[in-house]
């Protein structure tokens, strides 16, 4: 099939590349000329395992990049809208890019198209897109028909290519059987083993995306609430997690205690869901609590550091291992590291940071106005620090040389924001070891 993907952000680039890998002819569009120029050289703007190789393998064969949206729209059978929907100040999803693209589609389609909303959008947005396209078409003498589809993405950063190529499910919201069948043909190569193609109405498809992320975020905030209580009553959350996770109704996924979720999806989608509730005069009390617990979690982690070293941190030096909001990505958006580094610097501390992939993001955007030392490797970051603080559970941090760390640190103190070293008995190695959910 001939596919246009409007937007080459995280979702658009993965979507377009994976469809191209299956033999479809894919034209990816972006208004950023430098970005497109880089993509045409095989230079991708994000770190995502396996993506660079797929882009290189398909570039100028089945995968093409352009700034010419008119060409892409007119030459395609299926058009995917995959532009960003960032969070506005009031928590609402900013849909300006989505609506701009909708108008552009309306101005340029000349024959029947299937138009797919891939961006995460509030319930009712796909209908608004349809109305905008219809309005633009009405300005021309045209009998062009089109069909709308809601096809939410369920991609985990750090494992997005695998998620797309071997999906748990593909959710399609549409208005007629012909469209369901066409989308099923498009996704058929991804279901060689088991068909998990789920069809529903458009509004339900839009809500499915938000409901899924809200449930996962709820599990994270729930385990963090129980972890905080466990500290106070003398329980060990690491043992509690095993106890409840063994229940098949609960499971182990997303019940790891830590410093809270970050990234672009959970914070943005939770805020948008709360805003959607307000618009419809319904207070989502549980979801609001999920958000509040998450915000509080990184503050409670900072309190552990303050309890040990005090609020006046002049003359103190701290090592941060991990800046991205999760491993296997360079994405720092809403990462707890942003809050923690800023607060430590405000209190007068010197901060030394290291992350395998997110250092450039930190330098250019998030810490560009802060005095921060960017270490060359994880051990360089530890030199003469008063404490090591683990924030992201990258693989290279799992089994470090603790004897070497002990020699490099001024004070043998480790704050573990992911409970990664729980089983390593660091106290027996001579460290003061602080984790989440254990006193």
Image (cartoon, grey):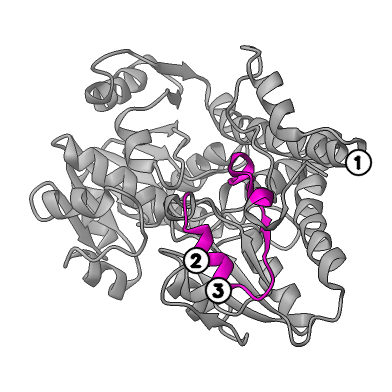
Horizontal arrangement in the rendering, residue 386 relative to residue 227 (left or right)? left
Q: Is residue 141 visible?
A: no
Residue at the far right in the pictured view: 233
Horizontal arrangement in the rendering, residue 388 relative to residue 330 (left or right)? right
Q: Nearer the viewer, residue 295 or 359?
A: 359
Q: Nearer the viewer, residue 307 or 174?
A: 307
Q: What is the magenta range?
A: 399-428
Q: Look at 46% across and 66% down and name the residue there.
A: 358
Q: Are marks 2 and 3 in contact (CB under 8 Å)?
A: yes
Residue identified by numbered label 1:
232
Residue identified by numbered label 3:
408
3D distance between C-alphas at marks 1 and 2: 33 Å
Rendering coords of residue 147 (x, y %): 38, 31
3D distance between C-alphas at marks 3 and 1: 32 Å
For label 2, the SS is helix
Q: Are marks 1 and 2 in contact (CB under 8 Å)?
A: no
Q: Look at 83% across and 42% down and name the residue there.
A: 228
Report the disc number at residue 297: none
Rendering coords of residue 420 (x, y %): 58, 45
């Amino acid at each position: 099939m001939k596919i246009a993907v409007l937007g080459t952000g995280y979702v658009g680039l993965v979507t377009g590349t994976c469809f191209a890998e299956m033999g479809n002819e894919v034209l990816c569009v972006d208004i950023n000329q430098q970005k497109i120029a880089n993509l045409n050289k095989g230079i991708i703007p994000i770190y995502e395992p396996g993506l660079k190789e797929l882009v290189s393998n398909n570039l100028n064969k089945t995968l093409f990049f352009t700034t010419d949206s008119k060409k892409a729209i007119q030459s395609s059978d299926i058009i995917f809208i995959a532009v960003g929907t960032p969070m506005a100040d009031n928590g609402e999803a900013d849909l300006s890019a989505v609506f701009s693209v909708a108008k552009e589609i309306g101005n340029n389609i000349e024959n029947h198209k299937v138009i797919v909303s891939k961006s995460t959008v509030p319930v009712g947005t796909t209908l608004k897109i349809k109305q905008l396209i219809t309005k633009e078409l009405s300005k021309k003498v045209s009998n062009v028909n089109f069909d709308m589809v809601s096809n939410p993405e369920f991609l985990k950063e750090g494992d997005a290519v695998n998620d797309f190529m071997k999906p748990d499910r593909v959710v399609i919201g549409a208005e007629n059987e012909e469209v369901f069948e066409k989308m099923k043909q498009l996704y058929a190569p991804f279901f060689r083993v088991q068909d998990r193609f789920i069809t529903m109405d458009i509004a339900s498809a839009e809500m499915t995306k938000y409901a899924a992320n809200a449930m996962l975020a709820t599990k994270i905030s729930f385990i963090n609430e129980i972890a905080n209580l466990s500290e106070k009553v003398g329980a060990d959350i690491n043992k509690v997690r095993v106890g409840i996770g063994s229940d098949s109704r609960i499971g182990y996924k997303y019940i790891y205690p830590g410093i809270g979720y970050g990234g672009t999806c959970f914070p943005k989608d939770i805020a948008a869901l709360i805003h959607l509730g307000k618009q419809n005069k319904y207070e989502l009390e549980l979801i609001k609590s999920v958000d509040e617990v998450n915000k509080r979690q990184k503050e409670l982690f900072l309190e552990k550091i303050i309890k040990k070293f005090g609020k006046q941190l002049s003359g103190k030096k701290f090592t941060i291992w991990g800046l991205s909001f999760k491993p296997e990505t360079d994405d720092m958006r809403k990462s707890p590291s942003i809050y923690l580094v800023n607060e430590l610097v405000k209190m007068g501390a010197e901060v030394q940071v290291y992350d395998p992939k997110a250092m450039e993001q930190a330098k250019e955007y998030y810490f560009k106005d802060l005095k921060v030392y960017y270490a060359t490797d994880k051990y360089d970051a530890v030199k003469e620090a008063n404490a090591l603080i683990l924030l992201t559970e990258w693989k290279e941090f799992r089994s470090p040389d603790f004897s070497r760390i002990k020699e490099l640190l001024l004070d043998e103190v480790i704050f573990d924001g992911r409970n990664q070293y729980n089983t390593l008995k660091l106290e027996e190695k001579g460290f003061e070891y602080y984790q989440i959910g254990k006193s």
